[in-house]
Amino acid sequence: MRVSVRVATRADEASVVDTIVLAFSADPVVRWCWPDPHRYLVSMPAFVRALAGQAFDGGSAFQTADAGGGALWLRPGMHPDEGAMVGLIERTMPGSARDELLAVIGRTAAYHPQEPHWFLPLVGVDPARQGHGYGTALMAHALAECDREHLPAYLESTNPRNVTLYERHGFRALGRVPLGESAAFVPMLRPAR
């Protein structure tokens, strides 16, 4: 089955955000942050928008034709809304978890490239469609643009199951930043081609 990918606009925002929220419902890092299902469902959509909402205005939000998968990339010069992210974390997470997460985010930032690059904050596939090539199609679509611009790509994997997908697309792990007892961020870089 061929999975087609297109640019997602602000009109597609709710659909893409919903898909990403579904995709991250069992993510080790995200669920460490919001283990309570209700708090997760209330907090995660706002977090997605704060972390990567600029992608909808920058032409770097992508969605599969059937809305089963979405990816929010930030082009060079685009950044997460850090104020909104920190505010959300402060309002929705208990003190000890919040402090640990903010410290880990600070340590992870040391891996973020300084030169112009594409940054993938979020890519996700509806769990009912996982394992059918959606993630591969979404990655290939955006990485083709990175290659046309001869720019590196960077991401921080929060789920060990996804690392091999990223490696197949040319990313390599730069390190591992643990969070809690079992979760971790894995910063990954794909050199310019």
Image (tube, rainbow, N blue to C red):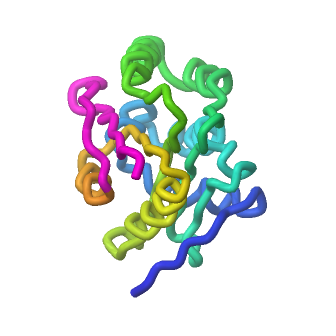
Image check: 66 left or right of 99? Answer: right
What residue is shown at x 50% (from left), y 30% (from top)?
115
What residue is shown at x 32% (from left), y 58% (from top)?
169
In the rendered image, residue 145 lying in the magenta stretch gets the answer no
Task: Report which quarter residue 156 is drawn in.
Answer: top left
Question: In this orientation, does residue 21 appear?
Answer: no
Observer-nearest residue: 50 or 74? Answer: 74
What residue is shown at x 48% (from left), y 62% (from top)?
144
Residue, far bottom: 1
Q: Is residue 1 above or below residue 52?
A: below
Observer-nearest residue: 164 or 169? Answer: 169
Q: Is residue 173 above or below residue 68?
A: above
Observer-nearest residue: 137 or 146? Answer: 146
Image quadrant in which the N terminus is located = bottom left
Question: In this orientation, does residue 78 appear?
Answer: yes
Q: Is residue 126 above or below residue 51?
A: below
Q: Is residue 72 above or below residue 76?
A: below
Query: How many badges with numbers are in the image?
Result: 0
Magenta residues span 170-193
Residue 105: x, y in percent? 43, 22
Image check: 155 left or right of 172? Answer: right
Residue 66: x, y in percent? 57, 77
Residue, far right: 11
In the rendered image, residue 173 lying in the magenta stretch gets the answer yes
Residue 92: x, y in percent? 56, 26
Task: Report which quarter residue 139 is drawn in.
Answer: bottom left
Residue 157: x, y in percent? 35, 42
Observer-nearest residue: 74 or 42? Answer: 74
